[in-house]
Image: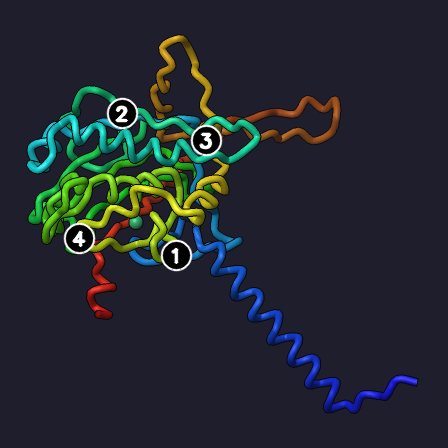
Amino acid sequence: MPPRLSLRAARTCLLALAVALTVTQGFASRARAYCRENVKAQAMGACSASADVPDLFWTRSCMTYVFNDQLVSRLPLLSEKELRDGFNESFATWQAVDCGKGRKPFYVEQTTGFTTTDKAEFLFDVMNESVIMAKTRDEWATLDQDANALALTLLWHDRDTGEILDVDMELNTGAGRFANCDKPCGRDMMDLRNTITHEAGHVLGLGHSTVQGATMFADAPDGETQKRTLEPDDELGYCKLDLPEFTCPDAACQCPAPEIYPSKRTVKSCACTTAGAGGSAPVMGLGLLVGLVGIAFARGLRRRKRS
Ligand SMILES: [Zn+2]
């Protein structure tokens, strides 16, 4: 006959089990630290997922961005070719992730020209360009943005559902000199691809990861290049986004122009009552509630504070 456990011994076993479960859960959450951006995202630091808050998501299968016409002159350590190649390579890094089952990646396309648009904004009733621009230190201060932020990705989205409608990106030339750090970079020099690969993750819908060394980690020291390549945490996060698959719409294989969002959406609501009673279907006008999430990427600010 097995010995009977006293009440005290039974309680001890229960406590041990609870502790063991807590520790195991702790390891599990550390192993998966990527985070999807949601409608209540904070600009700095790690993002926090919540089942009650809608994640941001793309319904389009591709997007096209364009450089502002002052971008090249405001990044004097880079040629236009280095700039264009750097952006292409940064987005291609994400598109190369294999999410299995022959899935085709979401497609990000760069236009060859420039735009005079120098403001991050979303407007109703017109086509919105996704603009990449560089701001001076004074302009950045005027926008009331963190002076240590290297770049800011602005995701315009439906505030209720989280659908991404438009995206813009600003680089802060007051926080660092953007360069190609294939050659060693000195003080205050920031590698373009290191920054843009991180920002590209935001464009796709990822927030900041708590995994140091991951591309989506929120900070970067001067001259860092390790964020050019993705870590397993970044790849897991990318695949979790489940982005719509791009298939070429025609022989030119170009991304179609983005949808124009009307300031008033018409929604049919059925007022039918009983079958055969000739129910009516009135048309209602609804405004689209647009939210803005701006996610900043900082230059090693907190790491320096700790050291
Ligand atoms: Zn960031």
Note whether residue 95 is visible: yes
Give the secondary structure at mark 2. strand
Instruction: State left or right for residue 36 relative to residue 42.
Output: right
Q: Amino acid at mark 3?
A: Thr
Residue 224's mark?
none
Residue at mark 4 to residue at mark 1: CA–CA distance: 19 Å
Residue at mark 4 to residue at mark 3: CA–CA distance: 36 Å
Q: Residue at x 88, y 84 (%)?
A: 2
Residue 110's mark?
2
Mark 2 or mark 1: which comes first in sequence?
2
- Residue identified by numbered label 1: 211
Is the CB–ligand 1 distance for label 2 below 8 Å? Answer: no
- Residue identified by numbered label 3: 59
Q: Residue at x 41, y 32 (%)?
A: 96
Mark 4 against mark 2, which lies toward the viewer? 4
Q: Residue at x 34, y 20 (%)?
A: 257
Residue at mark 2 to residue at mark 3: CA–CA distance: 19 Å
Asked if the residues shown at circle 4 and circle 1 are in contact, with their CB atoms under 8 angstroms apart, the answer is no
Mark 4 or mark 1: which comes first in sequence?
1
Asked whether 279 or 213 is in front, the reply is 213
Residue at mark 4 to residue at mark 2: CA–CA distance: 27 Å
Asked if the residues shown at circle 2 and circle 1 are in contact, with their CB atoms under 8 angstroms apart, the answer is no
Residue at mark 1 to residue at mark 3: CA–CA distance: 28 Å
Q: Amino acid at mark 1?
A: Val
Mark 2 against mark 3, which lies toward the viewer? 2
Residue 282 in which image quadrant: top right
Q: Residue at x 35, y 16 (%)?
A: 254
Mark 1 against mark 3, which lies toward the viewer? 1
Residue 222's mark?
4
